[in-house]
């Protein structure tokens, strides 16, 4: 719908300009409009082509743009997903929501999962602004260690419900297109490791559909890349040849069987999704050989824009992101698991999307996409009808926000205030802590 509205905007804008010109400067406006209406004759002058609707098109050209636009806006909306698939999914979601969202949460814990302190404060409350599934989520912050975490956290049923159709199923195509546009970020991550490291085997944890591994192979052509993920996408990554082996499952669960197998383990935007990040670090220490490297990239929960934009700061991503680990906490935990941090990156890892994403999240909330199977009741028809025009109207603001994001990225380059940080750690060569 939004793409249709964008595609139809230029002729409508031209028509509005000509109409405005006829009001403000009638003679020039009339001549310009007549020339525009006769333009199809010019196109075919000097050729043997005479389209059957040439005269009709020229005669009706002035009324076509507004007529087409109104007819499209008022016409029945064709969902991207076939109706029968949508109907089936709608029944499944209705069944999953039969008891409301209560089964999707565990009880609220009274202490910090990182340091055990009971000195907690509510930090942020947010709905699901990415998929717009029902439910409200709370992030709390520990006053002792500054760790921010989801409390109450999602239950296994909640994880199943909120991840469904996000990275696979109905959401697979959208995510694939998003990941394909992250080439620069993937190349930057792959280049973090010293060129002399020459890893033989690299395991990417949270590999999704294998996009990072595919690009990292350009940087490390002799390295074997394996990927691990909970979602079915990793099987597809192996089928495509983007990873040598795709391992489906939980990292702590499979780690004992892979002990000492890898020279590098990477976890890009993975730990914040997990239920217990410390177990994941232990698993990384298990699968790495002595002297191997662990590469971690995470959202920076202490970014200034995270405070200013509140729930519209994309990296909060509720309910998927369960932990926001301060860099100093991660550094200490890595040390306790037998690692030394050899590289820390802050400003240069900032992703310049905060402002434009905040506008997009606001638009999505005000004018939601209709016909998604988990939304009952469906949004009011007028809100769906205004979605396209609202997105077109917001385009100039989004262009400005994109430029502002880039300026901000330059300002943040030498600070610790970016939205992302990256640590490279090396496992002690004696293998112990
Ligand atoms: Zn704490």
Image (cartoon, rainbow, N blue to C red):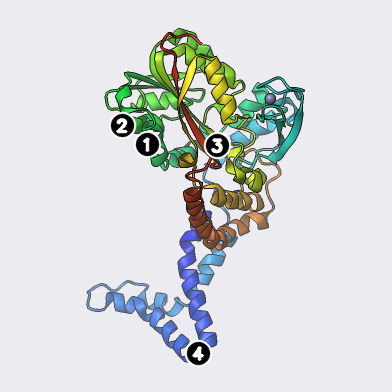
Q: Are marks 1 and 2 in contact (CB under 8 Å)?
A: yes
Rendering coords of residue 259 (x, y %): 44, 9
Question: Can you tell me whether the CB of the residue at mark 4 lies under 8 Å from the nearest atom of ligand 1?
Answer: no
Q: Is residue 65 left or right of residue 115?
A: left
Q: Residues within 10 Å of mark 1 (few under 14, many from 20)?
A: some
- How much space separates mark 3 and mark 4, taking CA atoms? 53 Å
Q: Mark 2 CB in 8 Å range of ligand 1?
A: no
Residue at horizontal 69 percent and vertical 53 percent from the top? 380
Vertically, is 429 above or below 163?
above
Q: Position of residue 296 (x, y in %)?
A: 48, 27
- First in sequence, mark 1 or 3: give its number: 3
Give the Cα separation between the discs numbered 2 and 3. Answer: 41 Å
How far apart are labels 1 and 3 at the CA level? 37 Å
- Residue 219: which numbered mark, if any? 2
How packed mark 4 is, by other alpha carbons closer than 10 Å (few <14, some 14-19, many 20 or more), is some
Q: Mark 1 = which residue? A: 187
Whole-number angstrom distance, CA of label 2 to CA of label 4: 62 Å
- One can see residue 273 in this view: no
Q: Residues within 10 Å of mark 2 (few under 14, many from 20)?
A: some
Residue 85 disc label: 3
Q: Earlier in the sequence, mark 3 or mark 4?
A: 4
Q: Which marked residue is nearer to the observer: mark 4 or mark 1?
A: 1
Front disc: 2 or 4: 2
2 or 3: tag closer to the N-terminus: 3
Q: Are marks 2 and 4 in contact (CB under 8 Å)?
A: no
Q: Position of residue 425 (x, y in %)?
A: 46, 23
Characterize the local packing of mark 3: few (<14), some (14-19) or many (20 or more) Cα atoms within 10 angstroms: few
Query: Does the residue at mark 2 contact the one at mark 3 (Cβ under 8 Å)?
Result: no
Res 202 seen here: yes
Q: What residue is pinned by disc 4? A: 26
- Residue 429: x and y, percent? 41, 12
Secondary structure under badge 1?
A: helix
């Amino acid at each position: 719908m939004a793409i249709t509205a964008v595609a139809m905007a230029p002729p409508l804008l031209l028509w509005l300009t000509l109409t405005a010109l006829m009001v403000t400067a009638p003679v020039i406006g009339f001549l310009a409009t007549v020339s525009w209406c006769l333009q199809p004759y010019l196109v075919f002058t000097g050729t043997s082509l005479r389209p059957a609707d040439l005269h009709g098109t020229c005669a009706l050209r002035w009324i076509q743009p507004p007529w087409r636009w109104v007819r499209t806006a008022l016409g029945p909306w064709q969902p991207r997903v076939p109706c029968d698939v949508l109907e089936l999914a709608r029944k499944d979601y209705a069944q999953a929501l039969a008891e409301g969202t209560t089964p999707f949460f565990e009880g609220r814990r009274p202490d910090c999962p990182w340091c055990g302190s009971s000195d907690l404060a509510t930090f942020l409350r947010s709905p699901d602004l990415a998929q717009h599934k029902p439910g409200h989520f709370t992030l709390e912050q520990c006053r002792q260690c500054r760790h921010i975490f989801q409390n109450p956290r999602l239950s296994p049923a909640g994880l199943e419900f909120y991840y469904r159709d996000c990275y696979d199923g109905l959401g697979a195509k959208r995510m694939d297109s998003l990941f394909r546009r992250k080439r620069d970020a993937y190349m930057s991550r792959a280049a973090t490791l010293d060129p002399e490291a020459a890893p033989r085997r690299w395991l990417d944890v949270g590999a999704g559909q294998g996009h990072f591994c595919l690009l990292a192979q350009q940087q490390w052509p002799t390295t074997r890349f394996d990927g691990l993920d909970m979602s079915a996408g990793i099987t597809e990554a192996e089928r495509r040849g983007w990873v040598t082996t795709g391992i489906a499952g939980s990292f702590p669960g499979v780690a004992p069987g892979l002990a000492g197998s890898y020279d590098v383990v990477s976890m890009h935007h993975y730990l914040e999704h997990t239920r217990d990040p410390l177990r994941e670090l232990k698993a990384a220490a298990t699968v790495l050989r002595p002297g191997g490297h662990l590469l971690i990239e995470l959202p920076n929960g202490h970014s200034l824009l995270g405070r200013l934009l509140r729930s519209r700061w994309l990296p909060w991503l509720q309910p998927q992101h369960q932990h926001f680990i301060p860099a100093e906490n991660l550094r200490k935990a890595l040390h306790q698991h037998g690692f030394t941090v050899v590289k820390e990156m802050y400003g240069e890892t900032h992703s310049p999307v905060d402002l434009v994403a905040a506008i997009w999240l606001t638009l999505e909330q005000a004018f939601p996409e209709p016909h998604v199977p988990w939304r009952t009741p469906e949004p009011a028809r007028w809100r769906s009808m205004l979605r396209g025009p609202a997105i077109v109207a917001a385009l100039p603001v989004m262009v400005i926000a994109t430029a502002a994001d880039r300026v901000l990225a330059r300002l943040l380059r030498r600070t610790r205030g970016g939205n992302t940080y990256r640590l490279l750690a090396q496992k002690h060569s004696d293998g112990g802590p």
